[in-house]
Image (spheres, grey):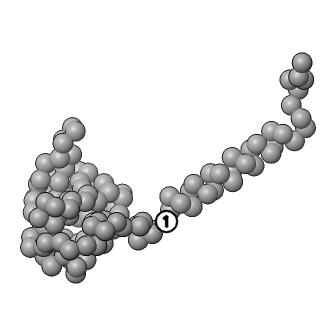
Amino acid sequence: MTDPTPTPGAAEGARAAVRRAAGRINSLLSKPAAAVQLGADSLLVQAPAEGEVWEAGKDHLVRWLLTGPVDPVDIHLVQREGASTVTRAVLAGGLPPHETSVRVSIPADTPAGEYLLLVTSQGLLDAYSRPFSITAA
């Protein structure tokens, strides 16, 4: 029969192992979006960042990474409604895909709330930004 009494220092060793694992996980999660490996035909929205706050009626920078042959890019402001998304505005359309950034103007009458940007290349490649907030003008 085994002795159920823990070995002295075993608990501290286990806590240290958990701290090391948590440190590695946090390090991986904090990598910039550019550290993500893109496939042959990929689209990745870099900005806005998760939790960023934009003001309605102002201009803001949208950035994306794109690989592969693609068509022009459109940028939509979307809001979640349950399990689906609803386009609130088309912020830009027909952009040259490999320019990878553009300044867009958020309409002044956009209600405050949580939003996403949809960057799409003629529907063949779609990518959403992380959730960000818009405040009233």
Q: Give me the residue at 69% from left, 46% from top.
A: 18
Residue 53: x and y, percent? 31, 61
Q: Considering the image in quadrants, where does the N terminus appear? A: top right
Q: Quadrant of residue 94?
A: bottom left
Q: In this view, does 1 lie to the left or right of 60?
A: right
Closer to the camera in the image, 57 or 77: 77
Q: Which residue lies furthest to the bottom in this view?
A: 99
Q: Give me the residue at 42% from left, 66% from top.
A: 36
Closer to the camera in the image, 40 or 107: 40
Q: Which residue does the numbered mark 1 point to in the structure image?
A: 31
Q: Quadrant of residue 124?
A: bottom left
Residue 24: x and y, percent? 61, 57
Q: Quadrant of residue 3?
A: top right
Q: In this view, does 2 lie to the left or right of 58?
A: right
**Element type where label 1 sits in the image:** loop
At label 1, which amino acid type do we have? Lys
Closer to the camera in the image, 66 or 92: 66
In the rendered image, the vertical position of residue 16 relative to residue 35, given as above or below = above
